[in-house]
């Protein structure tokens, strides 16, 4: 059972889980029309979540067919160009700024792109090393927002808000997710099929935090809390200061959690997307969850 879940998670991260017949293609430049978040899973694939910091009751959902803005009642509106948004992450220093990578309509790679109007329009900031890159995993430091990490064959880092990039070194094997620390700009976490890793030297070397089970999600909040989804255990939480993980919620059935967003103004409010394309919300720090919009 564990191995089958690993294979599902890995195929989803690679973008092969949904067939062309069910999702279409970003290169086809055809908008996906939905009226509810619950319909997204039937028409596209979710690649990232972010709190809308202009209105924290709303959720931004990056997909294979653009960015959707979701209202608390679950209504979803396409607000971005139709392209495949990967590595989707907010700039913690500016409520209107978002970062991403991925694929444009027509094919190819987007490089490192940014939006300064909350996801409506996007421009390439830099191609990245060996680019245009396609960062499937990307994270921005909560300590120094000028520092970003991106995964494209190797680990890349930017020290100037994405204008220039340099190679750091090899990626952790079978990488699924990246998250930068809230304590140090040189600390970054990696969720992999083999467990959870941490680097304290900007990605040059790694040590194991959780082993023996795949970790499909890692998220760090501004207060220094770590959230991870460990297959076979559930959603777990620890403080960066002690790294002692405790299970927050275990009853997920066959859902593999892939993306998470925590409200920077209220750490008890959080949202999660699973490999099935379901989106869930919690208002008690992740203990109890309900389908978003219900």
Image (cartoon, grey):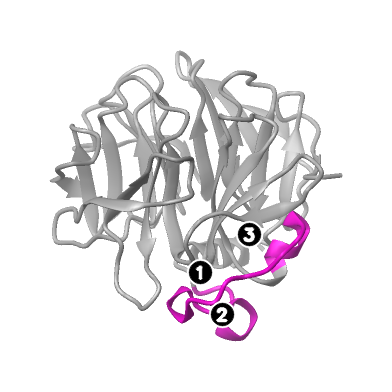
Rendered image: mark on residue 166: none
Within 10 angstroms of label 2, few (less than 14), some, or many (20 or more) residues? Answer: some
Secondary structure beneath dot 2 equals: loop
Mark 3 vs mark 2: in front: 2
- Evaluate whether residue 208 shows in this view: yes
Side (left or right) of 174 relative to 274: left
Nearer to me, 290 or 204? 290
Number of numbered discs visible in the structure rendering: 3
Name the residue at 66% across, 55% down: 77
Res. 275 mark: 3
| Extreme residue toward the right, this view | 294
Mark 3 to mark 2 CA distance (whole Å): 17 Å
Q: Real-space Cα distance between discs 2 and 1?
A: 17 Å
Give percent across and percent down for residue 66: 52, 61
Label 2 near label 3: C-beta < 8 Å?
no
Marks 3 and 1, the one that precedes in the sequence: 1
Residue 35 within the segment the image draws in magenta? yes
Q: Is residue 106 left or right of residue 219?
A: left
Give residue 107's quadrant in the image: bottom left
Is the N terminus in the top left, top right, bottom left or bottom right quadrant? Answer: bottom right
Query: In this picture, which residue range is highlighted in magenta?
Result: 16-41
Question: Which image quarter is the C terminus in?
Answer: top right
Rendered residue at 22%/32% (across/down): 202
Residue located beneath label 1 in the image: 11
Q: Is residue 245 visible?
A: no
Residue 55 x/y as whole percent: 63, 30
* Residue 54, magenta (yes or no): no
Q: Which residue is mark 2?
A: 24
């Amino acid at each position: 059972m564990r191995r089958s879940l690993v294979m599902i998670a890995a195929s989803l991260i690679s973008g092969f889980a949904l067939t062309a017949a069910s999702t279409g293609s970003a290169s086809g430049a055809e908008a996906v029309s939905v009226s509810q978040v619950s319909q997204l899973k039937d028409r596209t694939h979710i690649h990232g979540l972010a709190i809308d910091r202009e209105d924290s009751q709303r959720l931004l959902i990056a997909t294979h067919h653009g960015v959707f803005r979701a209202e608390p009642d679950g209504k979803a509106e396409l607000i971005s160009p139709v392209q495949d948004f990967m590595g989707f992450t907010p700039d913690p220093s500016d409520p209107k700024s978002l970062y991403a990578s991925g694929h444009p309509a027509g094919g190819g790679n987007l490089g490192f792109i940014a939006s300064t109007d909350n996801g409506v329009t996007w421009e390439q900031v830099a191609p990245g090393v060996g680019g245009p890159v396609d960062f499937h995993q990307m994270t921005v430091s909560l300590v120094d927002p000028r520092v970003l990490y991106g995964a494209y064959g190797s680990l890349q880092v930017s020290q100037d808000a994405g204008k220039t990039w340099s190679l750091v070194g090899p990626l952790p094997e079978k990488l699924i997710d990246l998250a930068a620390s809230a304590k140090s700009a040189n600390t970054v976490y990696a969720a992999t099929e083999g467990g959870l890793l941490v680097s304290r030297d900007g990605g040059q070397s790694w040590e194991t935090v959780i082993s023996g089970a795949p970790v499909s999600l890692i998220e760090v909040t501004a207060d220094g809390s770590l959230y991870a989804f460990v297959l076979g255990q559930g959603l777990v939480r620890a403080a960066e200061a002690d790294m002692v993980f405790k299970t927050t919620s275990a009853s997920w059935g066959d859902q593999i959690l892939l993306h998470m967003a925590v409200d920077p103004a209220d750490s008890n409010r959080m949202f999660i997307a699973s490999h099935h394309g379901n989106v869930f919300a919690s208002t008690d720090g992740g203990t109890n969850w309900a389908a978003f919009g219900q």
